[in-house]
Amino acid sequence: MGAGKGSMGQGAPTPEMYGKEEREAIRHLARINEVDTSTHVAPNVQGFAGLGERGFSEETREKNLMEVKRTIDFAADVSRGGPVVLHTGEFPRAVSKFTEEKFEAYLGEEKKQIHYLVNEKTGEIRRGVREDEEIWVPVHAKNEKTGEEIILKDEYGKPKKITLFDKEIPMYQYQLDKQGNIEIEKKVFSDYKKQFKNREGKIDEDKAAKSFYEEQLKAEQLQALGQADEYENHYKSALEEREKIIKSLKFYENLSKIPGVDKEKLKQELRTNVPFMPPEEVEPVSFLKERLRETEKRMNYGQETAIAGRKNAARIQDEIIHTKSIEEYGLEKSAETLARAGLYAMEKEKQIQRLEGEKEKPLFIAPENIFPENGYASHPQELKELILKSREQLKKNLWMNGNPTDKARELEIYSEKDAERAANEHIKATFDIGHLNTWRKYFRGDEKEFHQWIKNQVDDLNKAKIIGHIHLSDNFGYYDEHVDPGEGNVPIPQFIKQMQESGYKGKMIIEPAHQDVRAWTKFMSNFASPVYRTKLWTEDDMGFFKGRSYSPTYIVGGYAPESGGEETDWRLWSGIRLE
């Protein structure tokens, strides 16, 4: 359960807290008892895009990858292969993203959901565009006959355009009201996004959100450029005046050095030839020096303000270029991280082969669907996309068009086909049917429809060969409470049958919680084997509540009687330690 430096006392152990002797003991115990073991990265290590409190960061991404790596090391030592399960939950998104599938976190969520945008250079979450967000934009004048927006024409009758950072933008004519003012209209994102439909006729909400944000940025940008244009004119005007003043100042300073000259008469004669003449009633040199100082101040202010406007416009342009939807950015980062984890698993697998002489079983990473409110990859289609993208990245890392990475070269040179096979083998999903059942609380349909939705999603994942590991647990559709299998409303038998019919050959793990080994015996009792379907303790005279006070002899672990106050995990019923 721990991350970083663990603590046994606080119930947060980490893989590194188990030394070589303990790891070897676990491995031998598993072999003696003919059981396989699987490994789970600390559950509180979640998401591999690098999302932290202040947005995405490479430090957070690397830290989470490090937790996966040390768990892979543990799995290589103890399990000698198999799945290394890690929790997804890559970044936030609204449950009502799937409103067409009848999901909604709260009434009206669809109208208030937020589409997050990220600056890909900094990882900072810049903006969230709400469904009900409004912006005000100028109204473009339209041709009365055709209804088309009117673009201004130049002196040659061609569409007039302005060049904005190497991009030409048409200049539209704006609609004026009766007072001659430019009309302004309100745009709401929920309506605005309808123009962004893809080939399937579905709205590309990510593209729409980015465009909506750009509309606002461009308004700021044009304002900044307008300010720059205005103050550049001030700067040019002041610069021209400065040159005139300097010329006049030089004239008067030279004039004062000539003895016996009638300065007033000469001033009248040269008035038309000197660019800037002071009033007659003032001393020319002092006056011109003062004017020069004022003009230079205006010139500097105009220059600084114009530069600030240009800088701001350039900054906004950079923001426009490097803004991505959180899904586009986060998915790319998650896939990169998981591909690196998959490559590391391959390295450790090679080490096992050299140690054991042959590969016992593939060592692979197994991202697991988490809960709907925990964000991306909790929905089966998101999990599918994450696995496919991660595999594609690992394939690219291994193959690289015949130029594999240094790490991949240490393993072997891969053909494209071999790289694809290796990627598919070392990145597979852990599918938790109990986690999926927690979507039930947000489902706006009946139980039959919900079960059909689960079936359809599982069929789709199997068709794409996504699932490589399974967790079984039960709950009532609200939270992941892990009640005894068969005692909640998770469709476990139907799911198992569906997976068996699909040809699934991987493991199915029954996950306990407070009940410890009873999770297994209850599963066997309710679903699988009549051997475990004994009478309840309360059904006969042997029951606890009928005067008897001893436990059934098959109880072990936390339910076995205390013996001297010591741990009983590895004790037989007699109290003798297993070894």
Image (cartoon, rainbow, N blue to C red):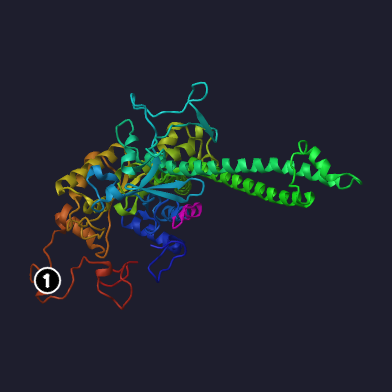
Q: Which residues are magenta?
A: 52-63
In the image, residue 10 lies at what x, y percent? Answer: 39, 70
Of residues 126 and 549, the one drawn nearer to the viewer in this rendering:
126
- Residue position for label 1: 543
The residue shown at (33%, 33%) is: 198
Q: Looking at the picture, does residue 21 appear above or below residue 371? A: below
Residue at 45 percent of width and 40 percent of height = 393
Counting every numbered tag in the picture gives 1
Q: Residue furthest right?
A: 259
Residue at image coords 89%, 44%: 261
Task: State left or right for residue 384 relative to residue 337.
Answer: left
Q: Position of residue 303 (x, y in %)?
A: 64, 45
Measured as percent of width and height from the top left, residue 431 is found at 30, 48
Picture quadrant where residue 213 is located: top left
The front one of 527 and 490 is 490
Viewer-proximal residue among 507 and 312: 312
| Residue type, numbered disc 1 | Gly
Instruction: Tell me if residue 362 comes above or below residue 551 in the rendering.
Output: above
Q: Quadrant of the N terminus?
A: bottom left
Side of 80 relative to 199 (left or right):
right
**Where is the C terminus found, in terms of image quarters?**
bottom left
Report crowding for label 1: few under 14, some 14 to 19, many 20 or more residues within 10 A (C-alpha): some
Seen from this angle, which residue lies furthest left?
Answer: 540
Q: Is residue 500 found left or right of 385 in the rendered image?
A: left
Does the image show residue 554? yes
Label 1, secondary structure: give it.
Answer: loop
**Relative depth, front residue between 303 and 538:** 303
Q: In the rendered image, which quarter is residue 324 located in?
A: top left
Q: Is residue 86 above or below residue 17?
A: above
